[in-house]
Amino acid sequence: MSPLNAQDRLRRMLAIVPWVAAQPDGATIEEICRRFELDAEQLQACLDTVFMVGVHPYTPDALVDVLVDHDRVQIRLPDFFTRPLRLTPAQAFALLAAGRSLQSVPGADPQGPLARGLAKLAEALGADTSEVVEVDLGEVSGDALAVLQRATAQGRTVEIDYYSYGRDAQGVRRVDPWRVQAEQGRWYLEGYCHSSDAVRVFRVDRIRRVSVLDEVFERPQGAGPLEVFRPEPTDPRVVLDLAPSAAWVVGQYPVEAVAEAPGGRLRVTLAVAARPWLERLLLRLGPDASVVDAPDELAGAGADAARRVLARYGE
Amino acid sequence: MAQSDKLERLMNLTAALLDADRPLTADDIAERVTGYAEGKEAFRRTFERDKDELRQLGVPLVMEVIAGSYPPEHGYRIDRADYELPDPGLAPDELAALRLALQAVRVGEQTGDGSEALWKLGGVVDPGDDVGVGAPPGDAVASLPPDPSLVPLFSAVLERRVARFAYASAGGDAERVVEPWRLEYRRGRWYLTAYDHDRGEGRNFRLDRIRGEVALDAPGTFEGPEPTAPEGLDQPWTYGEGEAVTAVLRVDNEQARWAREQLGDDSVLSTEPDGATTFAVPVTSWPAFRSFVLSFLDHAEVLEPAELRADVVAWLSRIAGEAVR
């Protein structure tokens, strides 16, 4: 490990000193290093420093007393550094939010160590309950999520009956589940889809049925962050002009290019993975969007979709 | 060994301010804390930097007028009650579970703070076989989006501070004064449940609609009781002000499940043998509801009221017509 700077050392020592002092027989160097994430050399350098710390008049009773005997460290303290520094609000929030997130995953034990730890933490923070932070990672119905998590952990291929919203089509696919993750309020399954011979991301709430097959697979190493929307270079592109009242599209859709167009409008380029996806966008925007450029197969997508829906209304 | 000198000096300074029974003046500190260079100017520069560093770490170092001094003299101190973390008394498996949670869930843009929080609680402890969190160790399970208002509002909840912020709604931005009770993440968004002073009732606020900074009053500026906020405020078609209109929507079998998740079980009027489902939905923002309905393409249809049905037809006719022209 590289040498720690003064702040890194201070952060650790303000936690290590009270912790070691609170252990009746001290602690081994090995255990301190493991708990506080530093190596023996770094710890030794810190202990050498702490050994000199104290308050005026720096008489023995006013100094931090560090005893290193072979591999064991003991610390005796004057009346300070007996407790670690408070958690910052950001630290406390991150702990509680992360813990409450896992607690919300179906199958989490409501009386388990995490639940107990969160309750104690909340109390130490001055809250009546850990429920001051509430997390719902995404809708899950049935046991699809649990089955997929198990199949992922065991490296077993699954068969899913899936409704593809983008394509507006239902179908059965064989998938090697690589990971199951919640993003933006939804659970997603990422994996290799045998049916389309490509890596695909599926929404778990659109899986109607999962069955675990006997086949096993090797999960590839080193996955980056899960990308919910991943346009292919071969996907067709459309160019739309948006009225000022539709400028929000830029923030909420994966827009690839934005330019200013006459009349205060915005000219945006979008990758279209599936036609129904574009149809929905155009129906939603109505007069706020006009298609400036589209490949032949997508020209008139909005008007065609509008006529189809009108037919349903008997028009 | 400059690093060691600095660590020693910062710890000595912290110890002195924690230990003193009255605020210490800069002169006291220069005289009583070892590690500062000789000379007033050199001391001042180093002391300024040290104060900043300690505050960055979250050390509650305050400057105040020393009681009884005349002319008034300023001194520094660290209140032990503000500095010390009360012992939560975590068992090893509980600490291990919290560590697993920090590994599995990315909260906002935060990256480095997780470890330090664990050190304060007793260090990094390996989870045993099962800590009952339903996640394989080491795997990312979820990420929660960042929001600049989260941490200030969380402090407000813990310390019972009244919060003030500008909030965007249908009628434009307006200043809100609220008693924050709970932060909630659902459907991919952060919400605050709070008692709204002006409206005299509990409300849910979307954090992404808060404009600018959240200002907090002093700790303990409200007591409770905790308000109940109306449920289901989070769908865009419930945002508008005014009387809700009940829309009746029929959705085909294939899409019915998804519609049900969005609209809630309570809104189901009837389900036909083939699975097609009819919903009754209170709507205050018609354009938002129209967007939702059209997302089903030709798999859904507004049945009632007639005005809303006519509006969909008019809207679609415009889109259908424009391409013909």
Image: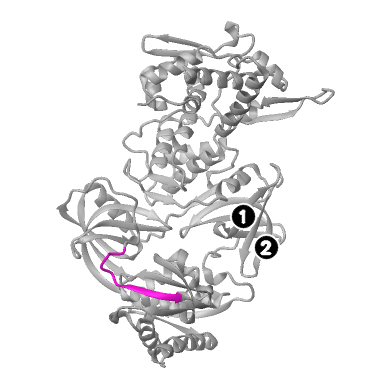
Location of mark 1 (residue): B212
Quarter the C terminus of chain A occupies: bottom left
Task: Give the percent coordinates (x, y) of residue B324.
Answer: 39, 91
Location of mark 2 (residue): B174
| Magenta residue check for A239 | yes
Q: Is residue B251 visible?
A: no
The residue lying at 25 percent from left, 54 percent from top is A177
Is residue A286 left or right of A89 when viewed as pictured? left
Q: Are marks 1 and 2 on the same chain?
A: yes
Task: Give the percent coordinates (x, y) of residue B225.
Answer: 67, 51
- Which of these two is toward me, A239 or B19? A239
The residue lying at 53 percent from left, 18 percent from top is B8
Tell me: residue B242, above or below residue A193. Answer: below
Q: Nearer the viewer, mark 1 or mark 2?
A: 1
The residue lying at 37 percent from left, 78 percent from top is A279
Say how the picture is coloured: one colour
Is residue A136 left or right of B221 when viewed as pictured? left
Whichever of labels 1 and 2 marks the residue nearer the N terminus, that label is: 2
